[in-house]
Image (tube, grey):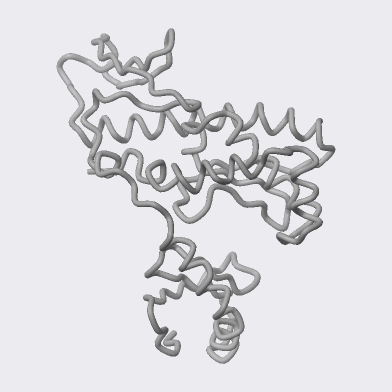
Amino acid sequence: MALTEAAGYQLETRISSRARRLRIEVRGPETVRLVLPRRCSMHQAEAFLAQHRDWIERQRQRLQARPQAPLSATLPWDGHAPLPLHGQLLPVRHTAHRFKRPAMRLEYGQWICLSHPGQPLDQAGLTRLARTTLAAEAGRSAARMLAALSAETGLQPIGLRISDTRAQWGSCSAHGVVQLCWRLVCAPPEVMRYVVIHELCHLRHRNHSPRFWALVASFCPDYATHRAWLRREGPALMRLLPLP
């Protein structure tokens, strides 16, 4: 489907059989994705895009204003540099074990990377192992936090999903499923707590109205501090563990 040429950014279009309505994703200052339901017409898509032109520009400017991540955060992981967890950098130690399947686990405040001496992991394998391990840890941490905060707030989601999103830290579907980026497990716990509260509040308010922010503040009075942390440190965190 061809749409009117967008000025100032690259427009990607994707037809989704699962999408129930048109959706815009500002994926970066130069890239915007338009997700269309299968039976959406070109006229509807162009009208929707035009209707949200000002919103798109505000999101692009916000992303453009984010501080650049340090160069070291964009480099491939060498398998030995410390990895973050809950706001702290933990050392990585390698050890051999007799099982051929590699593994990575948390033990006494450090990451233990286990691999068979006859089948050492290359850089790409180490990176994938670290990503999988952190995502699994994110799932466990998020499940515990979501259960506790659901009881505290009285806001009950129907499910939790851990994802590898790059455009947002979390979301809450219309069906009540909370989705969180696995990289949140690397941030301080209070930052992850804020994001969970933020998404739970969307169960009551499907917008960012003053009433929504008042509800967030009632459960997380210092939420502005954690939003500022994400704006400041988030770009580097989003570049964590790039695949070689």
Front-most of 226 and 27? 226
Front-most of 65 and 147? 65
Q: Which residue is drawn at 44% across and 71% down?
A: 32
Name the quadrant containing residue 65: bottom left
Q: Is residue 209 above or below residue 54?
A: above
| Horizontal relation, residue 56 to residue 217: left or right | left
Q: Residue at x 55, y 32 (%)?
A: 139
Report x, y in % for residue 27: 44, 63
Report x, y in % for residue 114: 29, 16
Q: In this view, does 55 lie above or below 192?
A: below
Q: In this view, does 60 lie above or below 11?
A: above
In the rendered image, the residue lying farthest to the left is 118
Q: How many labels does the image show?
A: 0
Report x, y in % for residue 199: 68, 47
| Quarter of the picture holding the C terminus | top left
Q: Residue at x 44, y 30 (%)?
A: 134
Front-most of 126 and 67? 67
Q: In this view, does 69 lie above or below 145?
A: below
Report x, y in % for residue 177: 68, 48
Name the quadrant containing residue 192: top right
| Quarter of the picture holding the N terminus | bottom left
Front-most of 50 and 122? 50
